[in-house]
Amino acid sequence: MKDIKTEVLVVGSGAAGITAAIAAARNGAKTLLVEYNGFLGGISATLPWLGFHDRDYRQVVKGLCHEYVTRLQKMGGSSGYVMDPKCSSLVSINSHIWKILAMQMAQEAGVDVMLHTHMVDTLREGDRIAGIIVEHKSGRQKILANMTLDCSGDGDVAARGGVSWEKGRTADGLVQAPTLVFRIGGMDKAAFVKGCKDKSLNYREWITPYPDLWKKMQERLDATDVFILGGFAGLMEKARKDGVIDVPQTRVVGVKLHQADQFQVVMTRVLGLDPTSVESMSNAYIKIYDQIPQLLEFFRRYVPGCENSYLLEIAPMLGVRESRRIMGDYVLEAEDLLEGRVFDDAVSMGGYHIDIHRPSGSWVDSRNVKAYTIPLRSLIAGEVEGLMMAGKCLSATHEAVASTRVIPICMGQGEAIGTAAALAIKNKTTVRNLNIQRLQDQLDVQGAEFGQSIGPPNQKAIDEYGQLPMEEPPTEGEMDAATSDQKHWIR
Ligand SMILES: Cc1cc2nc3c(=O)[nH]c(=O)nc-3n(C[C@H](O)[C@H](O)[C@H](O)COP(=O)(O)OP(=O)(O)OC[C@H]3O[C@@H](n4cnc5c(N)ncnc54)[C@H](O)[C@@H]3O)c2cc1C
């Protein structure tokens, strides 16, 4: 087949890739987006979006991501921003409307789109990544590009191109537990809220120890359709003992969505996944599809207001929280987030807590962070020219990516690399030699946030929604009864 030539090539159209492609094209680069699914958005098209704000309720992700939220709202496809003391903020979206909007915006920007196209190899010329090889129904094809942006979530371009990467935690290489999310409908919201107000059920474990926060949350429950759940441990334990569920999860985890009777269930999981092994991924699906009917039964029998709930939709792809992290010119660390570091070459921001779905246990490990910046260097692949990355596969440690991985923060990174790639091409230079001030000025014009305009803590919102302490007590759940059974492990 005929080779394709483009200026900017984006591999993967998830939160990071769709945003990178639109930003590159809007900045004048001929841009091609390659995606192996038949829709744009990756896993962002299956979940509510968390973490637009920091713990002081300042909006740390703006720009293109904010434009998505605004346009989704106009299309009746989102709740708008809802503040939350643990996750800072969330936006409940209609997945289908987001897929429509993502395609519309890609078309408006002039992005060329290749769907059902699998990147299978990387073209490397010396120390430069020159493009990729793809396979699709029409055959095998070479795509050459001035700049390649790896937004595959798995760092596929980097790995095939011989660029260094790491995976999982340092001690044992295990990645965060994955989840296939699904949505249920038919909930009775009033009865569900009544259950959440029953303190003995402990629907939100983070909040329960703080009476003032608990009171504020309770007051809002009737007024909002959108709120997060992480609790009901007693109900889960009872169902496990009754033999109704056998999943390596001990809490109800999910989000009450803006559609009045719908709930996003984030509770299936397996342990020991290798997201870069087809055998491991296939085994994960086999185990998880077996868990879904158990969880549906659990909701109907145990969760208040869910007696008549039914399965609405299973996400089209397994939610892999963590995969290869490409090693770049700088490796973002937990300390950078905990201290709220401001880098000279900051190009985007985050403020979501470090949220680790335990690789070898149930529930999560969590650490609150300050608003932090993301440096351009952590988005430039090390050792080579012509390759940048954003989203799950940015250059960060296992701990740091547990914060940067949420959808808005991935989108912020995507906008930064798309803009940087286009500017570098326009100025006939490399991204490493790009004038950082010029890039930051352009991001500022686009309304993106990289620390230049977040301002002081939003005291009004802190008073209204409350704030958790920076240091919270550790959670339990490493190797508990729910996770110790070998059958939940994939080896
Ligand atoms: C179970 C789960 C629940 C989560 N809950 C939330 C939540 O509620 N809110 C939130 O904000 N964040 C949540 N997150 C985090 C967040 O959804 C993801 O980390 C984020 O969306 C990742 O975006 P990405 O663009 O890096 O990757 P992805 O969304 O994974 O996108 C990668 C894209 O690349 C494509 N691709 C991969 N390899 C290739 C290839 N070789 N060739 C062609 N295409 C390829 C894939 O098809 C995909 O579309 C959750 C994550 C998981 C797994």
Image: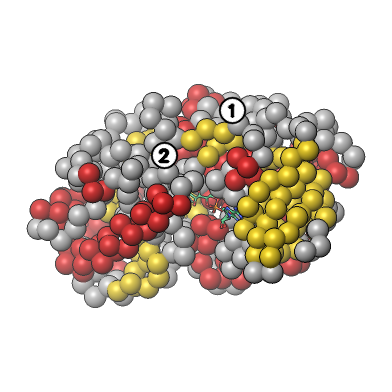
Mark 1–mark 2 distance (CA, rounded to whole Å): 17 Å
**Going from the N terminus, do you reach mark 1 or mark 2 first?**
2
Task: Identify which residue, 205 or 161, lies in the foreground.
Answer: 161
The residue under label 1 is 331
User: In the image, is the residue at mark 1 within 8 Å of ligand 1 by its beta carbon?
Assistant: no
Q: Quadrant of residue 387?
A: top right
Q: Amino acid at mark 1?
A: Val
Question: Quarter holding the N terminus?
Answer: bottom right
Whether residue 212 sits left or right of residue 75 in the image: it is left
Q: Which mark is residue 68?
A: none
Please name the residue shown 90% across and 39% down the image: 428
Question: Quarter holding the C terminus?
Answer: top left
Whether residue 24 sits left or right of residue 273 in the image: it is right
Inspect this view and state whether residue 220 appears: no
Name the image colouring: secondary structure
Q: Quadrant of residue 489?
A: top left
Name the spot of residue 403 as percent of width and height, x first.
49, 39
Please name the residue shown 24% across and 75% down the image: 308
Please name the residue shown 35% across and 39% down the image: 359
Viewer-side label of 1, 2: 2
Whether residue 285 sits left or right of residue 410 in the image: it is left
Q: Amino acid at mark 2?
A: Val
Label 2 environment density (alpha carbons within 10 Å; few <14, some 14–19, many ≥20):
many
Q: Which mark is residue 175?
A: 2
